Image (spheres, grey):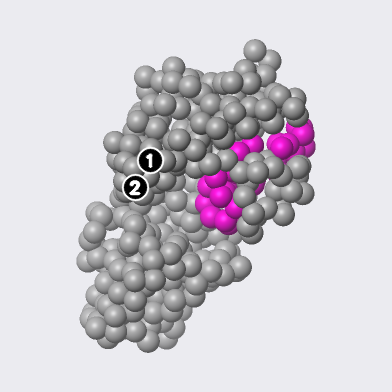
Amino acid sequence: MAVHSPKPAGAQLVALGQAEALSADYELVVAVGEGELTGRFAALGPVVAPSSRLPIWGASPARWSLEIGRALPDAVRIARLIRARDVRAVVVNSSILVAPVLAARLARVPVIVHVQEAPKSAAVRRLLRFHGAVADTVVAISPGIAQQLGDARAHVLLNPVGIPLSAPRAARGPRSGAALALVVVGTVDRHKRQDLAIAVLERLAAAGRDATLELIGGEADPGYGAELRAQAQAAGVAERVTFSGQRDDVAARVAAADVLLLPAGEVTPLVLMEAMAVGTPVVAARMGGVADVVGDDGTAGLLVPPDDAGAMAAAVARIADTPELAAALARGGRARVEERFDQRRSHARLRDEIERLTAA
């Protein structure tokens, strides 16, 4: 298994869950760098040097060329490792890892690639075409990605990522006199649009609503973090915004909130699933794979147009003013996650695909 990063973020935690499930039936060798998750992978099997990786956001052609050049000798190194350890299949957790895919071809073993990234640029679309042509199986984690891979030579397996299901929170009655607690979870980065969440808080305050906003996540862009603080100060809501940074109790903070906001969409936002699983109502921008997670009928969460702080604030107000709606969203969100995003189903589909490829 090749994992693109040891940081405890969405795709890496999905890979860790897969590794934990697969370790019951297989001997694992994990290629991952040194970091917070390395020890947990090491508990499941030997850890070896990580693969080189391609850039994601807006890199220059020169940077892409440099990283592709690094991938070629890295592929030879990994192919030798595959042969030396008698590896029978390679599982790659992200499309930005090219070397393990080439290595599997050199060593003549099947390779499964998970596509976690949205095809937002020409470079990423070319990368997806590469995996569709070279890999044995490409795992599409959303229907939108599966459509992008429709003409691939590889087998395209639609397998939405899943999460471990904990018990939902107890039903809550009206919180008389308490401020409405909003939470956003994600790296503080321009792509996550925390500025839109602060604009939502400003609109709620202007309407006379007592609300707070907690931003959970490390600051990848300190400049953007400074802009957010200045925005909150200028809007008169600075004392209502908390920058919590990275936390170990994210699940508990999400469960304690009244509403989880997702201002900008991703391919498959795990935090939406996690909030729905514990019964916290969600309000999300209709972008990326968000509708695939929440659904379009308004029974599991409320979707609003992108870049529309007014619509998002209005959706939050609806939830605050209608306890029956909040309770219905809590029930509907939990039911949708149980039906579609229990990680045990995802793990079983991956195991079946490994069995199919190795048997062949």
What's under tag 2, amino acid-wise?
Ala
Residue 189 location (% of width, % of height): 38, 63
Q: Give the magenta part as a residue range.
A: 1-29
Task: Determine which residue is flagged by label 2.
Answer: 59
Q: In the image, is residue 79 above or below residue 60?
A: above
Is 182 included in the stretch rendered in magenta? Answer: no
Q: Residue 89's quadrant in the figure?
A: top right
Cα separation, mark 1 vs mark 2, equals 7 Å
What's under tag 1, amino acid-wise?
Trp
User: Residue at the location (49% across, 42% down)?
Assistant: 53
Q: In the image, is residue 281 above or below residue 349?
A: below
Observer-nearest of 344 and 94: 94
Observer-nearest of 69 and 240: 69
Q: In the image, is residue 280 above or below residue 174?
A: above
Asked if marks 1 and 2 touch (Cβ < 8 Å), the reply is yes
* Residue 297 marker: none
In the visual, does 28 lie left or right of 60?
A: right
Task: Determine which residue is flagged by label 1.
Answer: 64
Quarter in which the C terminus is drawn: top right
Is 2 included in the stretch rendered in magenta? Answer: yes
